[in-house]
Image (spheres, rainbow, N blue to C red):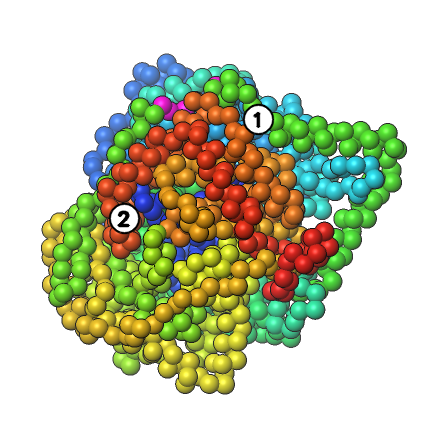
Amino acid sequence: MRAQGILARTVPIAAHMRMFAVSPSLSRSNRVLSFGKVGGRSSIQKGVKSPKNLGWQGLRPISVPGIRIVEASRMDSLTFSRGSVPQAVLSAPAPKLGADPEVATKLGYEVISEQFLDEYNSTAILYRHQKTGAEVMSVSNSDENKVFGIVFRTPPKDSTGIPHILEHSVLCGSRKYPVKEPFVELLKGSLHTFLNAFTYPDRTCYPVASTNLKDFYNLIDVYLDAVFFPRCVNDVQTFQQEGWHYELNDPSEDITFKGVVFNEMKGVYSQPDNILGRASQQALFPDNTYGVDSGGDPTVIPDLTFEQFQEFHRKFYHPSNARLWFYGDDDPNERLKVISEYLDSFEPSSSAKESEVAVQKLFGEPKRIIEKYAAGEGSETGKKHMVAINWVLSDEPLDLETELALGFLDHLMLGTPAAPLRKALMESGLGESIVGGGIEDELRQPQFSIGLKGVAGEKTAEVEELVFKTLSRLVEEGFTAEAVEASINTIEFSLRENNTGSFPRGLSLMLRSMGKWLYGGDPFEPLRFAKPLEAFKERIAKEGVKGVFSPLIQRYILDNRHRVTIELQPDTEKGARDEAAEAEKLAKVKASMTPEDLAELARATEELRLKQETPDPPEALRVVPSLLLKDIPKEPISVPITVGQINGTTVLSHDIFTNDVLYTEVAFDMSTIKADLLPLMPLFCQSLLEMGTKDMDFVELSQLIGRKTGGISVFPFVSSVRGKEKPLSYLVIRGKAMASQTSDLFNLMRIILKEVQFNDKQRFKQFVSQRKSGMESRVVGGGHAVAATRMDGMLNIAGWVNEQMGGLSYLEFLRSLEKRVEEDWPAVSQSLEAIRTAVLGREGAVVNMTSDETILQRAEPHVSSFLDAFSKSTGDKTCTWNTRLSAVNEGLVIPTQVNYVGKAANLFDSGYKLDGSAYVINKYIGNTWLWERVRVSGGAYGGFCDFDTHSGVFSYLSYRDPNLLKTLDNYDGTVDFLKNLELDNDALTKAIIGTIGDVDSYQLPDAKGYSSMVRYLMGITEEERQQRREEILSTSVEDFRNFATNLEYVRDNGVVVAVASADDIAAANKAKPGFFEVKKVL
């Protein structure tokens, strides 16, 4: 299970997050690329990335029990030798100081422990607030990306979703900030680098981060007031809005259920992978809190009462049950002063005792459980089964040595495509892709889970047999020395580099620490990996690979009777049964009501809607702290760049401190590929990394990458360029390594591109099945992204190309490709070779490197040798991709309880000329009108808009939405909203500041170098960046009103794509005959 809650961002295992008005995972590189950060359109599913993601290909996130790496970029590998991994993560020494002891004592804190963390060049002090028992970890270092978090243990006793609903609700106004949603006001007017909340199965986390000191403490104060003194505990309407309520617009109509969390969880329970994960967890832990769903089961959520909601907050949201975390370069004294204002307001409570998570005693015998999921009516169900084998590894705390060993074992078995358990499952042909997260250690007891989906019903038992057979073989044979070396280096590089992408490093460490701290363990232990890692290497050298790992497999997995096998079966009638059961329940509710009751319910429905749609007065909003325009830098963040040439090829160099790591990208012109080969590009990229050469099979190649580099990935990059019809398109190979291994890095990149052979039919079949399965999951869980990609494909050429490589057309291609591979593999292989021939030439290529100047200079001879391997020109320069999908309204039918609704048009086609104010207006629409109408009032989990300033496409999208036509009406209502907008100076300032926060988003060195490269390729100059920034800073209310005219073009000419249930699309076509062309997807 993964964390869900306020915003949809990648976090570890957990359950629930609150949705952002403008989805962060939907914000394209195009939206803010002119200024700074690079993003990418991707699924909102947590941890799932788009086909054009910037991460490291083909691996599961690395997990070492007790030492979890929360990553935005996946790592492929690294080097074993002592000097070949980063030795620090911060660019300057940190003071070895915490708060002044006298200050701490005066404020009522005692020091539990103080340690210097060499791994992070940080001083960490654990305090206890003497009055309440609250514990505070204060980590001081030179990192400007400051992090605060407060975490409560919140174990539920049932599946009404009470922790999840409370997590949403506490941010809807508080004692000091009595407005409807202070959280949204922070989204509008903060420079935050992270602003979120999420609910795990046993805890609720409220983290914030910012590089601006004033902004940071503003965020902390709003969050502390929200969790300790929320208005929601005295406001039943907030509970109804965020949790659930009966809705009745007219006594003559049917009653429905509404509520943000209710609809969110309907979406969750529409996804087979989520159903499997929940079934597995609950079956493993029948006797403690993990046996229920903290996020809420939609069939049970309506059982929750407001009184239970109030009591849960009173019991668990108390300092005695709190753990607070600070990280960064702010004043340690100030940290304690700020939180004392809140902690001192409370008396001690027994909440810490009441929130303890009971241990699940281990079973004496394994169990097998069959569950159902809703499949599309009339769809083929033969190879749609899922099976997962799950274990709880222990009912006693594991020592650090065992935890570390289990983490390495997990990576050895499953961490790469070449890992033996993963390889055996994928090569078996029994299923389409892996399910199960391997080892998960973020709850009280560690678990291990593995299985397959896309399995034939009669083959499910064979999956289980294969898992046990492979594990037994690993006990007997062990792992190769090369595999162990690559695995150790992969994990060590990741730990030391601490590259968490856009996820704040301090938050990554907080979540890591919580895995021990939350259950009474040592919060420092998960942060200290250097000595345990060295001891572990010594142990392997002494005891041998088999001596270390074979007993672990035998004891914790093979001989472990606490095992549950879950088989998830498709059921084409389940969706209809579930809908009928809900309708029957609501019909009974209505039948039990008198006419007076129904009239009162209709009145209450209207009263709630009026409250939701009535904005807070300007004077009320001024209480929410915000920065001033004078606090905002007038110039954009610049990245050093030197443009040179090697062997006639453009080389971009970025002199940035990287802790002795070299980051590099080589981009090859992709425009020479024939249009019919474009759908093969993602598979071409995967094949380069997961097939072998004439001298090495893919396992050996994978291990070599693991031993010699910090990771290599290959992906296509395609974007519109403003003012040009032809899109920008590149095949990018990306890698990183220690400076001492620059030669190895470029040599391996050459081998991958030039020497990998496309001759393994069976592996390629696996790739196709795996990607088809992934796309089908994406349609159900991330239908908004599918709709967005589909609309882009109708409106511009770059959108069409990306739709061919990652949209519905791609899914259709994969389905037909399965048959082609079987019937005419030579032709498919030749097509892959044709792509290589068309793309890999020096003409039009660009090399990008990020590191310090000395390392960059030393890399130049290796770059030269790399480029010498490629001919100057190649491919057909006459290739054109001048095509689009037909611009029609499409209803894409899937089995789902919620909808994903999109509408879009190209503003440039209407004559609009880009102005920086559009960035401010786009963000403001998402945080106000769409948030209030689509999410708050409409009940969707998310409603947002996106303006691609390179293609000109403006799109509206909703996520886990109970509505369809009503949502489209709200989109169209944006025009009048802007025309009639009254915006005072404070609100306008917030909107501008919030936009600058997006533009100036915090980046680590590799992301800075990559962003700079993309700006160079797209012709975005520093002068244009400055111009857009000035336009943002000078945005006026009149700009908002003028933009309404441009959105009239979307209202009147936009295309609509809805990913929805058959019933909802049929109802829409009944209300508006012929509105949708209907296309069944699943």
Question: Which residue appears at 51% of the width and 34% of the height?
Answer: 978
Residue 22 screen position, x and y as percent: 48, 42
* Residue bearing the label numbered 2: 1020
Compare residues 1006 and 711 and report the one nearer the observer.
Answer: 1006
Q: x, y percentage for residue 321?
A: 52, 29
The residue segment tinted magenta is 623-628
Q: Residue at x 27, y 55 (%)?
A: 1017
Q: Quadrant of residue 877?
A: bottom left
**Where does the C terminus fall, quadrant-wise?**
bottom right
The stretch drawn in magenta includes residue 835: no
Residue lying at 66% horizontally and 52% vertically, measured from the top left:
897
Note whether 24 is above or below 702 in the view shown.
Answer: above
Q: Is any part of residue 555 visible from this angle? A: no
Residue 507 in the image, given as x and y percentages of width and height: 39, 39
Judging by the rendered image, the residue that carries numbered circle 1 is 615
Q: Which label belongs to residue 401?
A: none
Label 2: element kind: loop
Which residue type does callout 2 highlight? Ile
Residue placed farthest to the front in the image?
911
Question: In the displayed structure, does residue 132 sit left or right of residue 267?
Answer: left
